[in-house]
Amino acid sequence: MTRLLLTLILPGVLAAASPFAWREAPGGQWQLTENGRAVATYNAGIQSHAKAPADRARCCYIYPAYTPAGVNPLDDFPEDHWHHRGLHWAWSFVEIEGKRFDNWMFRSLRHQSGTPVRVEAGEAKATLGVSNFWVDNAGKAFVREDVSLVVYPARGQAREMDFELTMEALDVPVILRGDPVKGKSYGGFNARFAPRTETVIRTNQGLLEKKNDDLTHYEWAEFEAVYQGRRAALRITADPANLLTPHQWVLRDYGYIGASFPGRTATVDGYTLEKGKPVTLRFRVRLADVD
């Protein structure tokens, strides 16, 4: 009997407890902690701001996200660009049947939560998965978007998380284009940064010497600054296996970086999503405390 009891009890006793925990909070927010400390929040529900225009309400993005020391370098609903939101993926020029749509500033197209959020918390990682839709003002869905997030334990002064974004047209072809404004190309995977001082932007090519940069191809970009007295950096690295890499980037010292897809070059002026032909983009985000 004693041996049988040990056989039944020991697996539970020996199993390592996960340092991660997910919690569903009001407003459709899925909050992740590691050893009781805040890590990141995925906003599955519609988020709004008392001062922002009503049509800037949105869902389906990450905000906030923290370094191991608890610094959140991201911003949401900044007054200079109400539509900017944490870590997000959006396009200002989406062409459907010859008409322009926009889930960047929510002109006629926006994200809508689809399947219930799926979360797991293990010893080596925490995961989140969800399927969303791009819908027009009448509620018609044109694109299915499958999002996968993997968050790894903090290692020293840094934490990394992997994003996988798979998009597929539901019916008619949907064309993603880089923004047509001269000298720009934005639309893709992006980050908006909180108020700060001592801003520095780096890429795999070195320190960015100018305030803004567009149309340049980089493998990664990093935004470092001081937030309420604490220095932190956030780096976005595009998977080299992504289509059309290295991506063009939009870099802004007022507080924005983004990897553009498909961008806009002499040979590329759009990418067509088709039914039955999904495209997957992957990005790694690294949040770090800096001495």
Image (tube, helix red, strand yellow):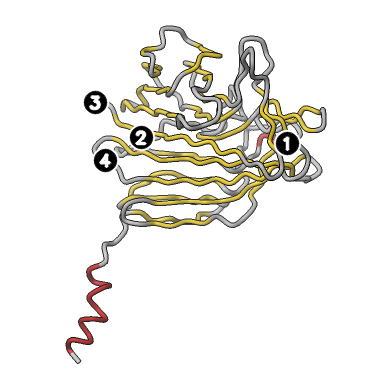
Give the mark, 1 or 3, whose residue is nearer the N terminus.
1
Which mark is in front, 3 or 4?
Answer: 4
The residue furthest bottom is: 1
Callout 4 environment at 10 Å: few (<14), some (14 to 19), or many (20+)? few
Question: From mark 1 to mark 2, how far is it between C-alphas?
Answer: 32 Å
* Relative height, residue 237 to residue 16 (above, below): above
What residue does disc 1 label? 109
The residue furthest top is: 209
Identify the secondary structure beneath mark 3: loop
Image position of 21 (left or right of 111): left
What residue does disc 2 label? 71
Give the mark, 4 or 2, whose residue is nearer the N terminus.
2
Give the mark, 1 or 2, whose residue is nearer the N terminus.
2
Question: From mark 4 to mark 1, how far is it between C-alphas?
Answer: 39 Å
At label 3, the amino acid type is: Asp
What residue does disc 4 label? 155
* Quadrant of the frame with the N terminus: bottom left
At label 4, the amino acid type is: Arg
What residue does disc 3 label? 291
Give the mark, 4 or 1, whose residue is nearer the N terminus.
1
